[in-house]
Image: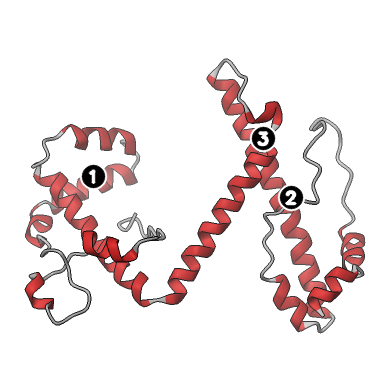
């Protein structure tokens, strides 16, 4: 992920234990003996340099999609544990993970952002489960194609609900900004569009009928007059 410009940002429940198992340094641990946080061993940067050509070939194959991740992992797993390319990839991963651990420890905003992203992901999956509660949440399909169709329909409905909520929140936010309600606008920015208490998830979905246009303005006008919303936003 790092080589493609992405960052894997997990949350650690036991950061103390993670540091004592997964923190590596560019120098011997004795060099950091005066520090509160010390690596468990020195990184083998020479191995990464020696295997850089093979690493680049692997990344290029993934970038050009001449191979898949599953095939690549399968081939690397078939190699002996002492294979130099596999060990070099592990060592490179140790560098990225160690740098992230130090950032995670040192940056409260990073920890908050990771927790917020994790909450969004969990809320999305809860909504997916609520949408796919048909047949009491059990798959009753015989073929893989039917299962894939069921899964994609569930994802479509879930994303439609999020889009509908986001449209309402965005329009209501613009209404509050134009009305000069800065406090209400600030609170609305913290509201998640992943909600379904106001959605009737039971019934029959008809995709063949021509949909009726939603009058967003009337919805916003009604929401702006709700006493509870006025209490929240001042």
Q: Eyeballing the image, is 44 above or below 108?
A: above
What SS does tag 1 mark? helix
Q: Which residue is mark 2?
A: 196
- Say few, some or many: other residues with alpha carbon within 10 Å of mark 2 (under 14 / 14 to 19 / 20 or more): some
- Residue at 50% x, 63% y is 115
Q: Eyeballing the image, is 9 above or below 180?
A: above
- Residue at 27% x, 68% y is 99
Q: Which residue is mark 1?
A: 58
First in sequence, mark 2 or 1: give its number. 1
- Residue at 13% x, 69% y is 26
Q: Quadrant of the N terminus?
A: bottom left
Mark 2–mark 1 Cα distance, whole angstroms, equals: 43 Å
The disc at residue 132 is 3
First in sequence, mark 1 or 3: give its number. 1
First in sequence, mark 2 or 3: give its number. 3
- Mark 1 or 3: in front is 3
């Amino acid at each position: 992920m790092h080589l493609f410009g992405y960052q894997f940002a997990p949350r650690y429940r036991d950061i103390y234990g993670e540091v004592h198992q997964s923190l590596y340094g560019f120098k011997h641990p004795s060099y950091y003996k005066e520090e509160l946080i010390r690596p468990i061993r020195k990184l083998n940067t020479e191995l990464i340099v020696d295997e850089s050509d093979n690493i680049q070939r692997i990344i290029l194959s993934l970038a050009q999609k001449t191979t898949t991740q599953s095939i690549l992992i399968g081939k690397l797993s078939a190699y002996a544990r002492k294979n130099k390319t596999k060990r070099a990839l592990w060592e490179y991963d140790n560098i990225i993970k160690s740098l992230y651990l130090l950032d995670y420890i040192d940056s409260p905003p990073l920890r908050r952002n990771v927790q917020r992203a994790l909450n969004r992901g969990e809320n999305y999956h809860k909504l997916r489960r609520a949408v796919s509660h048909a047949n009491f949440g059990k798959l009753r399909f015989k073929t893989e194609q039917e299962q894939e169709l069921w899964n994609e329909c569930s994802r479509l409905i879930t994303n439609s609900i999020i889009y509908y909520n986001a449209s309402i929140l965005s329009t209501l936010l613009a209404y509050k900004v134009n009305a000069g309600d800065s406090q209400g606008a600030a609170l609305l920015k913290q509201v998640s569009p992943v909600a379904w208490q106001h959605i009737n998830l039971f019934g029959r979905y008809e995709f063949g009928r021509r949909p009726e246009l939603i009058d967003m303005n009337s919805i916003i006008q009604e929401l702006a007059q709700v006493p509870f919303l006025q209490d929240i936003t001042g």
